[in-house]
Amino acid sequence: MDLADSFAGQQAGLCGAAVPGALFLMTGLHTGNVGFTVEVHDQAPPVDPDWEDVVEASFRPVSDSSSLVQWAGEDSWELGLEEIDYRVRYCAKGMDAANELDTRLDEEPQQDCYLLQFWPAASAPDRIVKQTSTIAAYWHDYARRQPPPPSPAERAEAERQTRLAQEQQEIERQLAYDRWEWGGQLPSEALRNVGGNVRGLLPFDPALVHALDAAGPDTQRAVAVLAARHACEAAGLADLDWIAAALAALSEGRPLPPPFDDWDRMWQALASDPRVPDKTVGRAVPPKRPPFQPPACDGSHTTMPKAVGRGVAIVESPAPQPSAGVTSPGLAVAIGTPVESLAMSQPHMALPALPAAAESNPLQAALDAVFAAVVTYGENYPALLHNIWATCRTQP
């Protein structure tokens, strides 16, 4: 609670009740222990004339757990109050002596004591019942100099404005994260929704991803075919008759021939062909980039989605239904920093580039085929991307 807010619009300055659900209780002593008693009554109790300073205010708990709490939260005591309207009376004795002492050590005699009383009652303005001490007069004057608290409508509007500002900050933070994730440029709706392995290719060359998105379908299809051919050549598959037939079909815009009409048969053909070379390459690792820095706002912390850093995924495909006696490779994803020395089978990385290039969506075909070629080239992928860029620039 803020001190000024707690006493806003009040006449009495010992028990601040202007903040809903809270009471700010003043003492004469600055540091040390005071005598303190809390009472809950069924109706208003009489005022004991021995108390030197007495004020009253209205209070309604905002939960079923109201506590008396020490200044820095060292200790607290449950009060057992209901969520109803209460009248609260705060009584004090010895405030001036305690204020003059300022700090009381445990072995020193007690200077001031207090009584806090609650009873059910309708809300009413605060009032000074009795004022004796100089320090109480000071706090009463302080309270009267505070502007009145906001009305319920003003408070609701302030909360609405705060909520709108927070929502706008979150929107800006998410936009900044999207720009960072997509290489400094927000993706188009087509790129955001294309699926496939766009996010696998993104860390390697975000500018290429956006360039392919901006290219027309003819360029996208040409890049897809080129990437599939590069992948097969790098893996030593391009001269195999069934691979060559598939590459020719892609170049001529025809459907892929068997065994590429069935995912299981495609992998079975690779496993059963003795001419498939045993070629491996180190994993492709994208270049490092600076971590995401959220935009400066009000200093509050919001957890952003965690980026997949330096991850490599095998080209994604529909989950196949294995045929009897045939084991099909599944989707494998490495999250985090891959082991760069781990050898990857180039034929197994290259083969999915062919069905990827035949995708009906030319943008997805280009992105998936290029990604398949990147993981096929492995640590040598920059040379591949150089060739892909050259194709993009020469296409209409």
Image (cartoon, grey):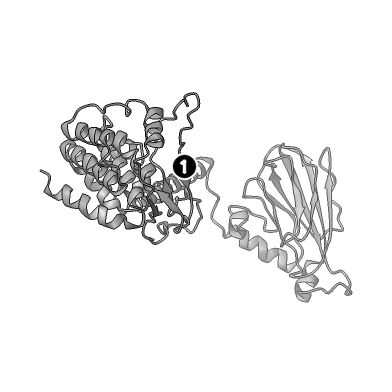
Residue wearing tag 1? 332
Callout 1: SS: loop
Front residue of 58/210: it is 210
Does 28 sit above or below residue 184? Answer: below
The percent position of residue 187, horizontal first and vertical second, equals 30, 44
Residue at the extreme front of the image, as rendered: 274
Residue 210 visible in the displayed image: yes
Front residue of 31/349: it is 349
Q: Quadrant of residue 132 in the image?
A: bottom right
Q: Residue at x 84, y 44 (%)?
A: 45
Q: How many marks?
A: 1
Does 297 sit above or below residue 165? Answer: below
Residue 169 visible in the displayed image: no
Front residue of 19/277: it is 277
The percent position of residue 311, horizontal first and vertical second, equals 43, 51
Disc 1 crowd rating (10 Å Cα; few below 14, some 14-19, many 20+) is few
Q: Quadrant of residue 84 in the image?
A: top right
Say left or right for 76 vs 255.
Answer: right
Instruction: Tell me the quarter of the image containing the N terminus.
Output: bottom right
Say left or right for 182 vs 71.
Answer: left
Instruction: Tell me the quarter of the image containing the C terminus.
Output: top left
Residue kind at label 1, given as amino acid type: Ala
Does 237 sit above or below residue 294? Answer: above
The percent position of residue 309, horizontal first and vertical second, equals 44, 54
Front residue of 232/200: it is 232
The percent position of residue 18, horizontal first and vertical second, equals 62, 50
